[in-house]
């Protein structure tokens, strides 16, 4: 009997440990990747590039990122639901209109556009690898947990939304 109870405690501990994860607010993650981009561009002795209109394209991507993030936040505010990605239990409404018809994660897409703009401004080709790393990090450590929580909250409605709307763009 004691062995069975001990096995149950161990399996519960394993379950709790598998659910644990480090939550970093997405803007902080973006800043970390931005700093890494700067350090890479500053200290890597190769990979520099330039092309006609590079700086203007960086400004365009930055502006597009601001617009995409603003529209995403505005939709959440209009729906009177939380923008906090850490406590999704407070989500009161599944936003599917406006920019959310085209992307399920406009705020993260805006952050990616900021990083791409920074990479262009810094002019080092290897910064694109860090932008890819940002997408990987967000998909693996942020979005998949958000999607699971939203599926628990909204069920079939959320699964249908996921089939109709792409994760990024």
Image (cartoon, grey):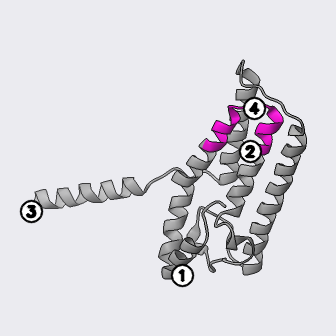
Mark 2 Cα-neighbour bin, 10 Å: few <14, some 14–19, many ≥20: many
* 11, 42: nearer the viewer: 42
Q: Is residue 29 magenta?
A: no
The tally of labels here is: 4
Q: Which residue is mark 4?
A: 38
Residue lying farthest top?
45
Marks 3 and 2, how far apart in space? 57 Å
Q: Nearer the viewer, mark 3 or mark 2?
A: 2
Q: Which residue is mark 3?
A: 1
Name the residue located 56 percent from the left edge and 47 percent from the top edge. 136
Q: Which residue is mark 2?
A: 115
Characterize the magenta stretch by its predominant secondary structure: helix
Marks 3 and 4, how far apart in space? 59 Å
Earlier in the chain: of badge 3 and badge 4, it is: 3
Q: Nearer the viewer, mark 3 or mark 4?
A: 4
Kindly identify which numbered label has been placed on residue 77: none
The image quadrant that residue 126 belongs to is: top right
Marks 4 and 2, how far apart in space? 10 Å
- Specify the segment rendered in magenta: 115-132
Question: What percent of the width, then of the height, locates residue 26?
Answer: 66, 53
Q: Which residue is mark 1?
A: 157
């Amino acid at each position: 009997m004691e062995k069975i109870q001990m096995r149950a405690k161990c399996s519960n501990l394993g379950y709790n440990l598998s659910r644990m994860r480090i939550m970093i607010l997405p803007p902080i993650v973006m800043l970390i990747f931005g700093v890494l981009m700067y350090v890479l561009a500053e200290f890597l002795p190769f990979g520099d590039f330039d092309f006609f209109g590079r700086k203007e394209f960086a400004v365009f991507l930055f502006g597009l990122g601001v617009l995409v993030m603003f529209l995403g936040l505005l939709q959440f505010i209009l729906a009177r639901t939380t923008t906090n990605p850490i406590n999704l239990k407070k989500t009161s409404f599944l936003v599917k209109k406006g920019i959310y018809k085209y992307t399920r994660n406009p705020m993260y897409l805006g952050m990616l556009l900021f990083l791409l703009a920074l990479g262009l401004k810094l002019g080092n080709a290897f910064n694109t690898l860090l932008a890819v790393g940002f997408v990987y990090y967000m998909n693996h450590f942020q979005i998949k947990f958000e999607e699971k929580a939203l599926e628990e909250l909204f069920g079939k409605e959320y699964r249908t939304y996921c089939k109709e709307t792409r994760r990024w763009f």
